[in-house]
Image (cartoon, helix red, strand yellow):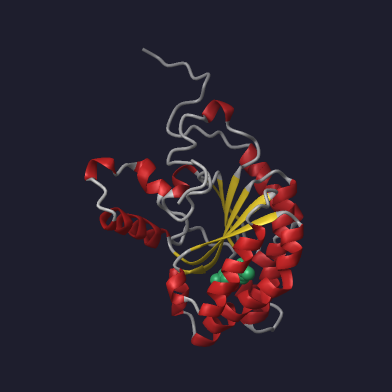
Amino acid sequence: MSETSHAAGSSAGAAAEAPAVPRHVALVMDGNGRWARKRFMPRFFGHKQGVDALVRAVNVFADRGVEYLTVFAFSSENWKRPTEEVSGLMSLVLVAVSKYLTKMAGDGVRIRIVGDRSAVSDKLRQAWEHAEKLTQDNRRITLAVAFNYGGRWDVVQACRRAIEQGVPAEQIDEQWLSRNMALSFAPDPDLFIRTGGEMRISNFVLWQAAYSELFFTECLWPDFGEAEIDAALAAFAARDRRFGGIAPNTVVAG
Ligand code: FPP
């Protein structure tokens, strides 16, 4: 399943040479509804602006040297939203694919969809497959769109796969699980960003975020532009990543 080997703990022990620019950013695009409400507009308007903000953000992250951007577009829990909003989000994605796919493909963006595709419509599934196929050779940045995705779902589907394949218990370790999870093609996220003021992970990249640096901002997603991206990247560059170890020059007493 994985095309490159970025097994679990890919970041462990790398403290000394941790790069200043994150290779992989995980992003929760929160605040579309509030952004729209502040303008006396329906929530859907906020989601539409959210798509435009995402298209802009992908290019900025790519320009800064980020190799993978994983965004939470629709969570396993978002089905609890009013039917109208759920179907609005589904059709918005279809519209977004037809509006932006050619541009993104031309911009060198490789698109991957992660999540449970079994519950989405045939039309949406086909659109995803088309987007993935068209962009599969692009390498400027990989945009992983988490759709009908949940971190717990991901752990469960990997465990089920192990049982279905009759993998012996002693072969199941962190590397095996990572290779069989939805983001197996990417290194673990170095930076986890959430806009919209909430400070929680909300079942996103639970396994992979073990050593991610967390960045929370009040900025609502549609307003998250170049300056805000640079602020998040600057905060990341100032972090001291130790991956459970100690700082290189620490004097160890005794
Ligand atoms: C959270 O804001 C946002 C979402 C649940 C959806 C995010 C989806 C997009 C931006 C569209 C992505 C589309 C593609 C093609 C990838 P919220 O509704 O929870 O806002 P609120 O907290 O202000 O209510």
- Spot occupied by residue 128 in the image (x, y as percentages of width and height): 58, 68
Q: Residue furthest bottom?
A: 84
Say which residue appears at 56% left-offset and 73% top-offset: 126
Say which residue appears at 65% left-offset and 36% top-offset: 20
- Which image quadrant for residue 168? top left
Asked whether the viewer can see residue 61, the reply is yes
- Spot occupied by residue 169 in the image (x, y as percentages of width and height): 23, 45
Ligand 1: which quarter?
A: bottom right
Residue 41 lies left or right of residue 173; in this view the side is: right
Say which residue appears at 74% left-offset and 66% top-offset: 102
Q: Is residue 241 above or below residue 77?
A: above
Residue 66 lies left or right of residue 72; in this view the side is: right
**Camera-side residue: 238 or 9?**
9
Q: In this view, does 166 lie above or below 195?
A: above
- Spot occupied by residue 54 in the image (x, y as percentages of width and height): 68, 63
- Which image quadrant for residue 103? bottom right
Asked whether the viewer can see residue 31, the reply is no
Point out the image quarter for the C terminus. top left
**Camera-side residue: 22 or 31?**
22
Q: Which residue lies furthest to the left in this view?
A: 169
Q: Which residue lies furthest to the top in this view?
A: 254
Residue 90 lies left or right of residue 66; in this view the side is: left
**For the image shown, how many numbered marks are present on the structure?**
0
- Spot occupied by residue 208 in the image (x, y as percentages of width and height): 45, 48
Say which residue appears at 65% left-offset and 48% top-offset: 232
